[in-house]
Image (cartoon, helix red, strand yellow):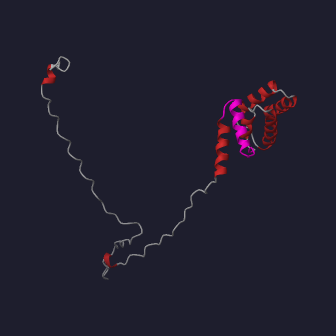
């Protein structure tokens, strides 16, 4: 035996002690039979003994089981490939962060031949677009939406409007952003 393969621990030369045997198996659960709620119920015992012979419980004919009606469950309607593509591109737009990513996602959505939905989260994301024409159309849609519903993500909304008000190249875009920001404060 070489030095490396030689055991240095004297206890390791001793045979291993046997471990305790396996645990005994747990007892099996008791099975209790119960009758179904719709089965025949036994007659209630009467307080006074009657002279009439009683029928044994086994002679009582059980009621006919209720027939279950078949239900046709339809799955979700099959979605065509165009709708799947639209949903994918829209989720990509909504998950984008930063002007570059939003611009790429919005351009891919438009390139797919889709119109942007008139919903606040989508239009709020479009405020990050690098094309000011898209930003102006988003501002118009948001102005119309705020007449009908309360703004969502108010701090983000105000921040993007302030950034547009301060840094937009077009004076018309700056003016629209300032007006919409005033509407949000009131």
Is 46 or 68 nearer to us in this picture? 68
Give me the residue at 41% from left, 66% from top. Answer: 37
Relative horizontal placement of residue 132, taking residue 9 as reference (left or right):
right
Relative horizontal placement of residue 8, taking residue 105 as reference (left or right):
left
The answer to whether residue 78 is magenta is: no
Does residue 121 appear anywhere in the picture? no
Give me the residue at 87% from left, 31% from top. Answer: 172
Relative horizontal placement of residue 85, taking residue 114 as reference (left or right):
left
The answer to whether residue 116 is magenta is: yes
Q: Which residues are magenta?
A: 96-117
Direction front: furthest residue: 2
Q: Quadrant of residue 96?
A: top right
Image quarter hosting the C terminus = top right
List x then y, in percent, for residue 148: 78, 44
Is 182 or 13 nearer to us in this picture? 13
Give me the residue at 66% from left, 42% from top. Answer: 89
Q: Quadrant of residue 61?
A: bottom left
List x then y, in percent, for residue 119: 73, 43
List x then y, in percent, for residue 152: 71, 37
Direction left: furthest residue: 14
Q: Is residue 175 above or below residue 42?
A: above
Is 55 or 93 nearer to us in this picture? 93
Q: Is residue 16 above or below residue 123?
A: above
């Amino acid at each position: 035996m070489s030095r490396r393969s030689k055991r240095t621990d004297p206890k390791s030369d001793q045979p291993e002690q046997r471990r305790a045997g396996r645990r005994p198996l747990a007892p099996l659960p008791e099975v209790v039979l119960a009758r179904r709620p719709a089965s025949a119920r036994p007659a209630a015992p009467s307080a006074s003994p009657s002279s009439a012979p009683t029928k044994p419980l086994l002679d009582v004919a059980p009621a006919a089981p209720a027939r279950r009606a078949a239900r046709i469950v339809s799955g979700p309607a099959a979605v065509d490939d165009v709708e799947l593509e639209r949903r994918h591109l829209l989720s990509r737009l909504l998950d984008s962060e930063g002007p570059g990513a939003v611009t790429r996602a919005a351009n891919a959505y438009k390139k797919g031949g889709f119109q942007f939905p008139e919903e606040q989260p989508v239009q709020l994301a479009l405020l990050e677009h690098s094309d000011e024409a898209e930003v102006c159309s988003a501002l118009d849609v948001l102005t119309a939406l705020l007449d009908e519903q309360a703004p969502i993500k108010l701090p983000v909304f105000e921040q993007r409007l302030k950034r547009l008000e301060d840094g937009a190249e077009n004076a018309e875009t700056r003016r629209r952003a300032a007006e919409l920001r005033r509407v949000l404060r009131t």
